[in-house]
Structure formats: C-alpha cells, structure tokens
DNA sequence: TAAATATTTGGACACTTGTCAAGATCTTAG
DNA sequence: CTAAGATCTTGACAAGTGTCCAAATATTTA
C-alpha cells in the first residue's frame, strides 16, 4: 500500500488507478490471477511499469485496492439508524444486493480462479473489519458469556458463509431462502430479532 | 504440487522433503514468508535449486506441503467410533491439543507474520476439507432445513474461530472456557449433544 | 554383480520483479 | 499567464523465478 486509499486523489491519479483497476478486472476474466503479470497490466493500460509501482507494491496490492473500492460501495453506514439487533440483517441485505448486482462479472472471474480461494479472502478480511465495527462491545448481546470479538467475527463468518454458498458455489435460490439459512445458523444468538423484522 | 503427498516416498526423498521443511520453518521464525526466497531455502538446506523445483512448484507449494504434514498429525479418524453428534467435540479436542503442543513454534512464526493472514489460510482450507468429510449429508442434522454443506462449513468455521481467537490473537484461557464459547455459538444447532458430553 | 532405469544435480537461459534517479509533464496558486 | 511544486515517465539495474538439459549419482532389476 503506497498511498492512503481513504484520502482524496487528483484527477490524474484517479485516471491511472481506474486504468489499472480496469486492466486487472479485464485480465481476470481471461486467466487466473497467478498468471497475470505486472507487465501485462501495464500493456493493457498503456502505463510504464514504474507508474504501476508508484501506486502499488505489487499485483496483490492492486487487488486489495480493488476490493477496497468495491467494499466501499456496500453502504453499511445506515446501520446507525437501526436497532442494534437488526444490523446483522442490514449487513446481509446490502451485501446480498451488492453481490447480486455484480454477479455476471463475478462469475466470469471465478471461472478462471476456482482454485485461487485466496482471491476473495482479502475482500472477506476487509468486510470483516467493517462488520467488527458494527458489533462493538457496547452493542453485542451475550457479551458477558462470550468475548464480543468472537461474536462479531461469528456474525461476519456466518453472513459470508451463506453468501458464498449462494454466489460462489453455484447454488441458486431466493434471497429469502438464503436469509432463512442465516437465521437458522444464528438462531441461538438472535433468533428473535431477525424473525421480528 | 509436483508429487502426490499421500503416496509413500523413498528414504532419500523424505530426507530432502524434511530438509526443505526444516529450512522453511527455521526461516519463518526470523522473517516474514514474503521475504523468504527459494535461494535462501536452498542455502539453508544445502540443496541445489533444481532439487527444490523437483519437489515443489514454488515456496507456496512447500508451505502447503508443510500444512499437509501438520494436518495429518491431527488424528480425526477416531470420529468413526463416536456418535455423529460428538464429532464436533472430537474435532475441537484434537485440534486444541495439537495447536497447544506447537504453541511456542506458532508464536515465533506469527511474530514475523502478523499481517500475512493468508499464511494460515491454506491450513484452514485443508482442515476444512477434512471437517466436511466428518459431516456428510447422512450425518448432519437439520439437513432438511439447511443444506448440509452449509452446516459442515459452519461447524468448521466456528471451531476454527474460537481456536484462532485463543491461539492467534494472543488470548489466554482454559480449554474449558474456549469450549464454552464454542457451545454458545453453536447452541442452536446441537446444544444437547455437546452438553451431554 | 552388472546393466538398466530413475532421480538428482549444476549451470545456463529467458523472463519477471521491485527500485532508483533523472528528466518530462501536468497542476495550481499568485 | 507563469513559475513552483507535485506527479508521472523512462530506462537501466540487481535480484529472484521457473524451466531445461546433460552429466552425475542413486536405485532397481536381471
């Protein structure tokens, strides 16, 4: 990470970042991530190698940047307006809709990256960080019995589990079905709150 | 993966595999995985580069081999003798004891690899594959309400979550405490079976 | 034991990687 | 509009990567 992605960028820098992002996403629809080289990304985007390294440490860093941008598109800020017990549903709802909207691109990518399970791993890590903020110690129920970090990670894991089952493992099914699975797995912890919704 | 690790190796081959394993583990106690080069592993183990590439595709492949060997040391075969409902406890029990036995080595490694979260990711993937075998469709309860792959992954995730909290995130606590957290998180799905144990 | 077969070794090769510093170009405040 | 300052481009570099092949060594088979 050569720059702070949360800071504003100049128009020129944004153009360059967008070009590398597009080059990577384009490359990913044709081959696996491991096969992609920095040279190739520079050829696709018509930038010299040194420019790439101006922005990113390596191709993994670019991937993290891309996940970061996509992650930002999942708007979870509204959870502040909702009851704590319903934040889990907000997370599921927003993430489901977001992934569904990008499903065709996603399918093209995983077609060539079925075995590169770490590809989406860092997307998961980043989302996990945000979810952990949603379920801080003051909000988590059962905080006397189980450490709140465990609760937060467990929520995050479980939401991502059902989403990955639905979108990554080629399973069809309605949003309602998927939600039902989620409710079942977390039944013990907050059955009431989810069912009430 | 240049060879089938499940097949028997000759004495000479085993000596070579052991040497590269030792070299990698030794290197990992001094620097991060990313900083380690194949050249370095060959110098440490006094083997030529070509020999390394005889056995492994790259350093990631060696890491997978190491996880594979460690994974084999966690004996889960006994689950066949137990009631299906208690297999989850067997998994927790064996994995806890195993990690505890290797805690000092583990600590030295994560000291230099705190941010390389993918380091243990593939260990997790491999263990996940074994856990999925433990909870096949014929065994999982609630199989009519939630797909069994989801149940199996959820079990695996949750066991690994509490173990990672305990051993990777620097939290102290007894095995009993850790088990209690696990029971709580999975309470809805099999509270009875675990409590009965 | 000796010949046949397989594996290991060392060096050479083409390629990728990440860094650097000097120069070119774009931005923006005055 | 212009000059200072920021940003981008460029080619060269040292080091790492993965493959190949022929010679050396080890293992198996007759």
Image: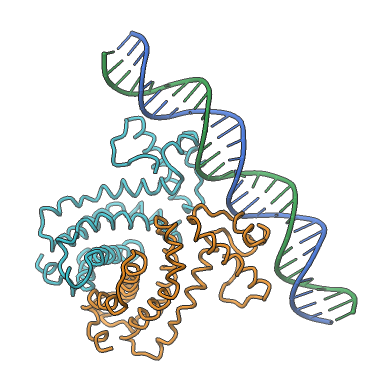
Chain colours: A cyan, B orange, C green, D blue
Q: Can residue B173 be seen? A: yes
Closer to the camera, A51 or B135? A51
Q: Which quarter of the rendering shows the C terminus of chain A?
A: bottom left
In this view, A43 is above or below B83: above
Q: Is residue B186 left or right of residue C26?
A: left
In this view, B29 is above or below A14: below
Q: Residue at x 44, y 65 (%)?
A: B122
In this view, A150 is above or below B195: above
Write down the quadrant of residue B111 in the picture.
Answer: bottom left
Q: Residue at x 26, y 67 (%)?
A: A150
Closer to the camera, B165 or B82? B165
Write down the quadrant of residue B115 in the picture.
Answer: bottom left
Q: Which quarter of the rendering shows the N terminus of chain A?
A: top left
- What is the x, y in percent for residue A104? 34, 53
Q: Is residue A118 left or right of residue A126?
A: right
- What is the x, y in percent for residue B139? 33, 84
- What is the x, y in percent for residue A164? 32, 63
Q: Is residue C10 left or right of residue A154?
A: right
- What is the x, y in percent for residue B120? 43, 64
Q: How many labels does the image show?
A: 0
Q: Is residue B86 left or right of residue B192?
A: right
Closer to the camera, A104 or B72? B72
Q: Can residue B136 be seen? A: no
In this view, A59 is above or below A48: below
Closer to the camera, A160 or D16? D16
């Amino acid at each position: 990470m050569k720059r702070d992605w949360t800071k504003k960028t100049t128009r020129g820098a944004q153009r360059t970042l967008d070009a590398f992002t597009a080059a990577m996403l384009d490359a990913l629809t044709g081959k696996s991530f491991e096969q992609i080289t920095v040279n190739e990304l520079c050829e696709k985007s018509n930038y010299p190698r040194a420019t790439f390294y101006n922005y990113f440490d390596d191709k993994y860093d670019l991937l993290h940047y891309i996940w970061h941008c996509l992650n930002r598109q999942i708007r979870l800020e509204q959870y502040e307006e909702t009851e704590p017990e319903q934040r889990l549903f907000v997370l599921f709802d927003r993430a489901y809709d977001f992934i569904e909207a990008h499903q065709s691109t996603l399918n093209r990518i995983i077609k060539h990256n079925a075995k590169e399970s770490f590809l989406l791993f860092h997307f998961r890590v980043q989302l996990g960080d945000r979810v952990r903020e949603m379920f801080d110690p003051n909000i988590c129920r059962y905080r006397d019995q189980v450490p709140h970090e465990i609760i937060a990670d467990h929520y995050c894991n479980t939401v991502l589990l059902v989403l990955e089952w639905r979108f990554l493992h080629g399973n069809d099914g309605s949003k309602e079905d998927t939600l039902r699975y989620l409710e079942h797995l977390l039944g013990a912890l907050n059955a009431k709150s989810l069912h009430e919704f």
